[in-house]
Amino acid sequence: METNTGNFNLYVGYEPWTKENGIEEENLHFRYKVIDIRTIDCQLLMESPILEENILAVLCQMENREETVREILYRISLLPESARADA
């Protein structure tokens, strides 16, 4: 997976993102990147050792959502009890 440093907004919605990618005011010019969750390879998120990235995979378009959720729940069950509460 390509890694980029910096800030971006992750868009999760039914319709494609069509709004501006920044704020333009008289004394403020701010740009940001918007990534549509549907454009992310969910398998890459599931292959990550980072549980939060695994959980994001649920928001992607995938062939077998039920299997993905089961796998994530299994990974959570392997965590120490104190960490499971935060997951």
Image (spheres, rainbow, N blue to C red):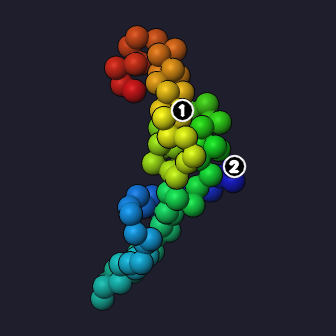
Q: Which residue is drawn at 64% across and 43% down?
A: 43
Residue type at tag 2:
Met
Residue 36: assigned label: none
Depth check, front residue: 64 or 50: 64
Task: From the image, tell me which residue sits under label 2.
Answer: 1
Q: Can residue 81 be seen in this view?
A: yes
Q: Can residue 8 be seen in this view?
A: no
Task: From the image, tell me which residue sits under label 1.
Answer: 67
Question: Considering only order in the chain, which callout, 2 or 1, is on the residue closer to the N terminus?
Answer: 2
Q: Which residue is drawn at 53% across and 35% down?
A: 68
Estimate how packed mark 1 is, as few (under 14), some (14 to 19) or many (20 or more) residues with alpha carbons within 10 Å: few
Element carrying mark 2: loop
Q: Which residue is drawn at 48% across and 67% down?
A: 34
Element carrying mark 1: helix
Tell me the CA gap for discs 1 and 2.
Answer: 22 Å
Relative to 47, say whether 63 is above or below: below
Relative to 19, say whether 46 is above or below: above
Direction from residue 33 to residue 84 in the image, left or right? left
Q: Where is residue 70 in the image (x, y as percent from the top left)?
A: 49, 27
Q: Where is residue 14 in the image (x, y as percent from the top left)?
A: 38, 63
Quadrant occupied by the C terminus: top left
Q: Residue at x 54, y 32 (%)?
A: 67
Which of pointers 1 and 2 indicates the residue nearer the eye?
Answer: 1
* Number of numbered discs overlaid on the protein picture: 2
CB of mark 1 within 8 Å of CB of mark 2?
no
